[in-house]
Image (cartoon, grey):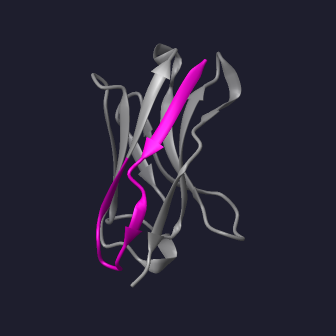
Amino acid sequence: QVQLVESGGGLVQPGGSLRLSCVVSGSVSNIHAMKWYRQASGKQRELVARIASGEDTIYADSVKGRFTISRDNDKNTLYLQMNSLKPEDTAVYYCHADAPFLRPEGYRGKGTLVTVSS
Protein backbone atom coordinates (compact mmCIF):
# COMPACT_ATOMS: atom_id res chain seq x y z
CA GLN A 1 0.00 0.00 0.00
CA VAL A 2 1.00 3.57 -0.68
CA GLN A 3 -0.40 6.67 1.02
CA LEU A 4 -0.21 10.14 -0.50
CA VAL A 5 -1.01 13.44 1.23
CA GLU A 6 -0.96 16.69 -0.73
CA SER A 7 -0.60 20.20 0.68
CA GLY A 8 0.27 23.70 -0.44
CA GLY A 9 -2.84 24.72 -2.33
CA GLY A 10 -4.60 28.01 -1.79
CA LEU A 11 -5.69 31.27 -3.34
CA VAL A 12 -3.13 33.16 -5.41
CA GLN A 13 -3.31 36.12 -7.77
CA PRO A 14 -2.57 35.73 -11.48
CA GLY A 15 1.18 35.79 -12.04
CA GLY A 16 1.86 34.43 -8.58
CA SER A 17 3.52 31.21 -7.45
CA LEU A 18 2.71 28.22 -5.29
CA ARG A 19 4.57 25.07 -4.37
CA LEU A 20 2.59 21.90 -3.87
CA SER A 21 3.94 19.04 -1.80
CA CYS A 22 2.97 15.38 -1.65
CA VAL A 23 4.27 13.26 1.20
CA VAL A 24 4.50 9.58 0.29
CA SER A 25 4.45 6.73 2.78
CA GLY A 26 4.07 2.96 2.73
CA SER A 27 5.67 0.73 0.08
CA VAL A 28 7.71 3.53 -1.46
CA SER A 29 10.23 1.17 -3.05
CA ASN A 30 7.48 -0.18 -5.33
CA ILE A 31 6.80 3.20 -6.93
CA HIS A 32 7.95 3.51 -10.54
CA ALA A 33 6.90 7.06 -11.35
CA MET A 34 5.09 9.97 -9.73
CA LYS A 35 2.63 12.32 -11.35
CA TRP A 36 0.60 15.43 -10.72
CA TYR A 37 -2.88 15.54 -12.20
CA ARG A 38 -5.44 18.31 -11.99
CA GLN A 39 -9.16 18.52 -12.49
CA ALA A 40 -11.02 21.76 -12.95
CA SER A 41 -14.70 22.01 -12.22
CA GLY A 42 -16.71 20.49 -15.04
CA LYS A 43 -13.63 19.29 -16.90
CA GLN A 44 -11.80 16.01 -17.32
CA ARG A 45 -8.73 15.14 -15.32
CA GLU A 46 -5.51 16.34 -16.94
CA LEU A 47 -1.96 15.06 -16.52
CA VAL A 48 0.15 18.04 -15.49
CA ALA A 49 3.60 16.54 -14.98
CA ARG A 50 5.38 13.24 -14.49
CA ILE A 51 8.73 12.26 -13.03
CA ALA A 52 10.16 8.78 -13.48
CA SER A 53 12.55 6.91 -11.23
CA GLY A 54 15.38 8.05 -13.48
CA GLU A 55 14.40 11.70 -12.97
CA ASP A 56 13.05 12.01 -16.52
CA THR A 57 10.22 14.54 -16.59
CA ILE A 58 7.35 15.37 -18.91
CA TYR A 59 4.89 18.26 -18.79
CA ALA A 60 1.59 19.17 -20.31
CA ASP A 61 2.01 21.79 -23.02
CA SER A 62 -0.15 24.16 -21.01
CA VAL A 63 2.34 24.29 -18.12
CA LYS A 64 5.72 23.91 -19.86
CA GLY A 65 8.14 26.60 -18.79
CA ARG A 66 5.98 27.56 -15.80
CA PHE A 67 5.74 24.41 -13.65
CA THR A 68 8.54 22.18 -12.34
CA ILE A 69 8.09 18.72 -10.88
CA SER A 70 10.74 17.41 -8.51
CA ARG A 71 11.16 15.05 -5.62
CA ASP A 72 13.24 14.60 -2.50
CA ASN A 73 13.79 10.87 -2.03
CA ASP A 74 15.24 11.39 1.46
CA LYS A 75 11.99 13.05 2.54
CA ASN A 76 9.72 10.85 0.40
CA THR A 77 8.16 14.02 -0.93
CA LEU A 78 7.04 15.06 -4.40
CA TYR A 79 6.82 18.73 -5.33
CA LEU A 80 5.21 20.87 -7.99
CA GLN A 81 6.57 24.40 -8.25
CA MET A 82 4.04 26.53 -10.09
CA ASN A 83 5.05 29.95 -11.37
CA SER A 84 3.31 32.56 -13.51
CA LEU A 85 -0.04 31.12 -12.51
CA LYS A 86 -3.07 31.81 -14.67
CA PRO A 87 -6.79 31.66 -13.87
CA GLU A 88 -7.03 28.56 -16.09
CA ASP A 89 -4.68 26.76 -13.69
CA THR A 90 -7.48 26.76 -11.11
CA ALA A 91 -8.22 23.14 -10.23
CA VAL A 92 -7.87 20.44 -7.63
CA TYR A 93 -4.35 19.03 -7.94
CA TYR A 94 -3.76 15.37 -7.20
CA CYS A 95 -0.58 13.47 -6.53
CA HIS A 96 -0.41 10.02 -8.14
CA ALA A 97 1.99 7.11 -7.70
CA ASP A 98 2.48 4.37 -10.29
CA ALA A 99 3.07 1.07 -8.49
CA PRO A 100 2.03 -1.60 -10.99
CA PHE A 101 3.16 -4.54 -8.83
CA LEU A 102 0.90 -3.35 -6.01
CA ARG A 103 -2.12 -1.97 -7.84
CA PRO A 104 -2.50 -1.53 -11.62
CA GLU A 105 -4.41 1.74 -11.31
CA GLY A 106 -1.86 3.22 -8.93
CA TYR A 107 -2.54 5.39 -5.91
CA ARG A 108 -3.89 8.92 -5.63
CA GLY A 109 -4.11 11.46 -2.85
CA LYS A 110 -7.22 13.41 -1.88
CA GLY A 111 -6.05 16.52 -3.66
CA THR A 112 -5.38 20.15 -2.85
CA LEU A 113 -7.31 23.08 -4.31
CA VAL A 114 -5.49 25.79 -6.22
CA THR A 115 -7.46 28.92 -7.04
CA VAL A 116 -5.93 31.60 -9.23
CA SER A 117 -7.98 34.76 -9.07
CA SER A 118 -7.65 38.47 -8.50
Quarter of the rendering occupied by the C terminus: bottom left
Q: Quadrant of the N terminus?
A: top right
Give residue 75's quadrant in the image: top left
Q: Residue furthest front?
A: 11
Q: Main secondary structure of the magenta part?
A: strand
Q: Position of residue 31 (x, y in %)?
A: 51, 23
Res 44 seen here: yes
- Residue 11 within the magenta-colored segment of the rendering: yes
* Residue in view at x 69 percent, y 22 percent: 103
Is residue 61 visible from the viewing direction of this image? no
Give coordinates of residue 29: x percent, y percent.
Answer: 46, 14
Number of disc labels: 0
User: Observer-nearest residue: 29 or 76?
Assistant: 76
Residue drawn at (38%, 38%) of the image = 78
Q: How far across and how far down the image is residue 115, in percent?
A: 47, 70
Vertical arrangement, residue 25 with respect to residue 88, above or below: above
Viewer-side residue, 104 vs 61: 104
Q: Describe residue 106's horizontal placement relative to residue 93 as left or right.
A: right
Q: Residue at x 40, y 69 (%)?
A: 11
Indicate left or right for 41 with 58 as reference.
Answer: right
Q: Is residue 118 magenta?
A: no
* Image x and y of residue 69, in percent: 36, 47
Q: Residue at x 51, y 70 (%)?
A: 90
Q: What is the magenta range?
A: 1-20
